[in-house]
Image: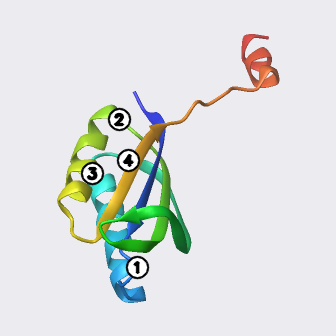
Amino acid sequence: MMTVYETMYILRPDLGDEQVEQAVAKYQNLLTEQGAQNIEIQNRGKRRLAYEINRHRDGIYIQFNYTAPATAIAPVERAMRLSEEVIRYMTTKQVVREDKTAKEAVTA
């Protein structure tokens, strides 16, 4: 069963544009290998952190929205945990609400 997920992660602020693109491609490919579909990538850019993390005051925020089986999350988070370029990550399961009109159309 496919579920909708959102993964937000923060990269080190000292990475160049090319390194950021490589990191994004790396995690996108890993998700695809794990069976994820409809991957939407949003680069939120460099922002000030609310508190210092590993001596970093800024970070580059990247957001992935995708559908994937539940087994796809653990390998991606493990890769992020072991990576030197990722300073924080979080994956949340999204609640998808169906339209009542769509339900009624199917049952009618």
Other residues around mark 3 within 10 Å, as few (<14) / some (14–19) / many (≥20): some
**Upstream in sequence: badge 2 or badge 4:** 4
Type of amino acid under label 4: Ala
Cα separation between marks 1 and 2: 31 Å
Residue 76 bears which disc, if any? 3
Q: Which mark is residue 69?
A: 2
Secondary structure of the residue carrying tag 1 is loop
Question: Looking at the image, is mark 3 or mark 2 earlier in the sequence?
Answer: 2
User: Tags 4 and 1 in contact by the CB under 8 Å rule?
Assistant: no
| Front position among marks 4 and 1 | 1
Q: What residue type is disc 3 on?
A: Val
Mark 3 residue element: helix
Determine crowd level at label 2: few under 14, some 14-19, many 20+ residues with C-alpha closer than 10 A.
some
Q: Residue at x 24, y 41 (%)?
A: 74
**Seen in the image, is 85 located left or right of residue 66?**
left
Distance between mark 3 and mark 2 Cα atoms: 12 Å
Tell which of 68 and 10 is nearer to you: 10
**In the image: residue 66, left or right of residue 14:** right
Q: Which residue is mark 4?
A: 36
Residue at 38 percent across and 79 percent down: it is 20
Q: Say whether disc 1 or disc 2 marks the residue closer to the N-terminus.
A: 1
